[in-house]
Image (cartoon, coloured by chain):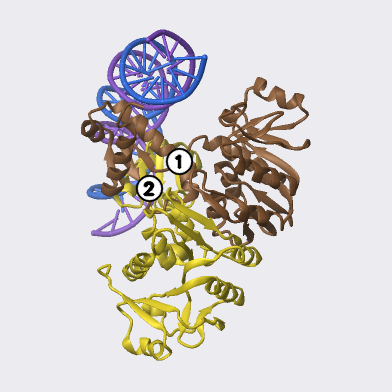
Chain colours: A yellow, B brown, C blue, D purple
Amino acid sequence: MPRGTRARRAAIVRLATTSGLASVEDLSATFGVTPSTIRRDLAHLEAAGELARTYGGAIAVAAHPEASLRQRLGEAFDAKRAIATWAAAQIRAGETVLLDAGSTTGALAHELRAARDLTVATTGMTVLEELATAEHVHVECLGGTLRHLSAGFVGPLAEAALSRMTFDRAFLGADGVDARDGICEASLQQTRLKELMAHRSEKVYVLIHSAKLGRRPFHAWARLDPGWTLVTDADAAPEALAPFHEAGVEVVVADPAGG
Amino acid sequence: MPRGTRARRAAIVRLATTSGLASVEDLSATFGVTPSTIRRDLAHLEAAGELARTYGGAIAVAAHPEASLRQRLGEAFDAKRAIATWAAAQIRAGETVLLDAGSTTGALAHELRAARDLTVATTGMTVLEELATAEHVHVECLGGTLRHLSAGFVGPLAEAALSRMTFDRAFLGADGVDARDGICEASLQQTRLKELMAHRSEKVYVLIHSAKLGRRPFHAWARLDPGWTLVTDADAAPEALAPFHEAGVEVVVADPAGG
DNA sequence: CCCGTATTGCGCGTTGCGCGCAGGAGTGCG
DNA sequence: CGCACTCCTGCGCGCAACGCGCAATACGGG
């Protein structure tokens, strides 16, 4: 193998997956080889499933990695969909609901795309992306400072917007949840916002997949007033749910079949 | 529109996204139209970011189409990049800038992803998506009611957030622009917001690709105070720019090479 | 050293593509 | 009702990109 072939093909994949698109002409100029060679490279890479050919170039098959969020969307997909399906079924026509940031609330938004006569307010970009093309859903973004890690909004603008609205139901996510301490998050800014969200809503649901139950990864807590509902998936261990029952929290285990 | 065009294009998207791949020949046979028509359909759908063209057909774009990728697939990419590159070069370290909703401002956001010591406020989802993973850029979302068509925010929440901030520079998009009347949009809600955005900013730029110059597609206008700058691309006809020169508007023609 | 394998550049014929043109269907207006 | 306007459609043409075969070249093992 003439030297550099392997490296060149790897570089083509890297270029294509970072910029999304790569043209035969550009690649040819970049590597100092003829377009024929590039075409052959692309044919190889396409056969290997690393790229897709286009007219005049190649396109990344799975665009940017964007690991953190995409992976979180990927993991526990079935559990999140089950939770989201149950949550979506609680919502009545004409209501105004509040969706927190996070992948589980994003899954809920996905279920609501076909809804009509519904107002959704949110602090999460995943929710916005799901509902961006949902023509018949009225969407209010609360705004605020973008937290890059969670793709959600926090801070004064979000709090100010919250003070101008109330909601029939709030669906909150969490990094951890405890029967007495409430919701656990990485920062007090987030927990203050979640407390506000809960206070502005008639009914509060905490959507959390079973692996996060009982976890206490951080030390900022949002206390919740009695009457909230914990929604989790069927993999939840009974002993993990017991403290919530004892504390008088309503516990819902979402059926994967979509009940 | 001859009946069925809309339905056929929707069906093409469905076929492509379910089977992953669709050829021009097959589609032509399936719908009983000529390959030319299918190619035009695909061109439309590609510009809308719903598909990617391949040699002889089309391929489904990833489940969650990456913003920047959709933009590259979309129309007038080179022009928008040229405008965005010039605009990005105007911004100084430590500034706070305001980015309107729209694909051109999305392209500007793309150029700012690697920036440091910069605060970006925006009403556009394309901007948010571009900067979602830009760790070192401080992003403020103004919030508001989502306009599904333009993927931007308008209304009271956005206006309230604007009243709490001021900016060094504002970069506005437009559906049309006129030397005397200012910015043309589909609704007065949008134009009022743009007027507010302009008033809250030291320097105002209108980013608009040349095809929109002189177009008056709607009848809601945002008047701009003197001193604003029109930024367009090299395809702009001199006679289209003349009225702006006469009105004392600073006109910038962005060099595609990236000057 | 020799040989097999993989790669490269080049020229060829083929194929799909974009564009311009003309006709037709739907829409809004006087 | 006619008229202008817009959008979609089919067709033909020039062109760009493609795939393929050929000969030359580079690398690695026996």
Residue appearing at x 62%, y 46% in the figure: B100
Query: Disc 2 to disc 1, how far (Cα)?
Result: 10 Å
* Amino acid bearing label 2: Val
Query: Tag 1, which secondary structure?
Result: helix
Residue A258 picture location, percent across and down: 27, 67
In the rendered image, is residue A245 in sight? yes
Above or below A228: residue B101: above
Residue named by callout 1 = B73
Quadrant into which the C terminus of chain A falls: bottom left
Residue situated in front as seen by the camera: A8 or D1: D1
Residue situated in front as seen by the camera: D28 or B114: B114
* Amino acid bearing label 1: Leu
B230 vs D7, left or right, is right
Total tally of numbered discs in the picture:
2
Residue named by callout 2 = B61
Residue situated in front as seen by the camera: A125 or B218: B218
Residue appearing at x 57%, y 31% in the figure: B218
Q: Tell me whether circle 2 and circle 1 mark residues in contact (CB < 8 Å).
A: yes
Residue B194 picture location, percent across and down: 66, 43
Residue A70 picture location, percent across and down: 42, 62
Are there few (<14), some (14-19), or many (20+) residues within 10 Å of tag 1? many
